Amino acid sequence: IDMDSCGCALELLGMLVYVVGWLCALATALLPQWLTMSTALMPAESYGLGLWETCVVQDLGVMECRSYDSLLGLPGYLKLARVLMCTSLAAGLLGALVAAPGLHLVNSCGAGAGGSRAKGALTATGGVLGVVSGVLCLIPVSHMAHLAVVHFFDDTVPDMVPRWEFGEALFCGWAGGFLLVAAGLLLVSSCWRSRAEPRPAPQGRYRVMSAAEEASSRKRSEYV
C-alpha cells in the first residue's frame, strides 16, 4: 500500500496524541481533586472531592482519603460523572485497539484494494471512537466546573462559608478530552487523505497508449 509521508505522519501523530489523551482521562477519573476547598479557620488543611473518595491534605504533605460509603447515597452529579468517565475510558480504549491495526505501518488485513479499504475503515472507526471518548470526558468535567462556579457566586450563601474551587483533575480532564477529540480528527483526516490520494497509471499501459497515438499521428501525416 503506497502512502505519502504526510499521511503516515498524521497517523502516527494521531495515535501519539490518542494515547496521551487517554492517559489524561484515566488520571482524571482516578484523581480525588476534582474540587478543592480550604477554610480560613484551618489554613493548614485543604479538602479534595473526587469521584470515588474525599481527601484531606495537610501542609506537611500527609493526605488521608476515605471512600464513599454508599453508591445510592451519592449526589446525582457524581453518579453521572462516574458513568460518563467510565464510558469515555472504555470507548477510548476500544478506539485505540481498533485504530492500531488500521495503521499503514502495521501489516494487517492483507494486500490489495480490499485490504486498503479495511484498514481505512478501522482507522476511521478508531478516530470516531476517539472523538466520542473526548466528548464524554469533557461533559462531566465541564458540568462539575459549572456547578462549582454557580455555587461560588451564589449570593444566598454567606461570604464566610467556604466554597469549592477547581481542582487539578478538572484541568487534566479538559486536556484529555481535547486531546482525544484532536486525535480522532487526525485519524479520520489521515483516512480521507489516503482515499483521496490519486493512484498513478501503470507504466506499461502508458507506453502502449503512447505508441498507438504515435502510429495514428504518422498515418494522419501520410494521408496529408
Image (cartoon, grey):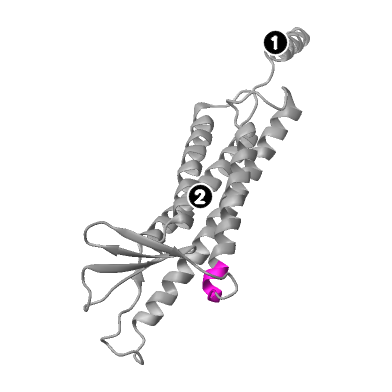
Give the main secondary structure of the magenta stretch.
Answer: helix
Q: Amino acid at mark 1?
A: Arg
The N terminus - image quarter: top right
Q: Position of residue 84 (x, y in %)?
A: 57, 62
Q: CA distance from mark 2 to mark 1?
A: 48 Å
Left or right position of 125 against 73: right
| In this view, 119 is above or below 168 | above
Left or right position of 140 against 64: right
| In this view, 164 is above or below 100 | below
Residue holding disc 2? 180
Residue 182 visible somewhere in the drawing: no
Q: How many numbered markers are drawn?
A: 2
**At 61% from the left edge and 57% from the top edge, which residue is drawn?**
87
Q: Position of residue 122 (x, y in %)?
A: 67, 38
Chain-order first, disc 2 or disc 1:
2
Residue 102, quarter of the rendered image:
top right
Secondary element at tag 2: helix
Residue 2, quarter of the rendered image:
top right
Q: Position of residue 192 (x, y in %)?
A: 61, 40
| Magenta residues, start to end | 74-80
Q: Position of residue 36 (x, y in %)?
A: 34, 68
Question: Which residue is more in the foreground, 113 or 219?
Answer: 113
Q: Amino acid at mark 2?
A: Leu
| In this view, 2 is above or below 178 | above
The C terminus - image quarter: top right
**At 63% from the left edge and 30% from the top edge, which residue is drawn?**
198
**At 67% from the left edge and 13% from the top edge, which residue is drawn?**
203
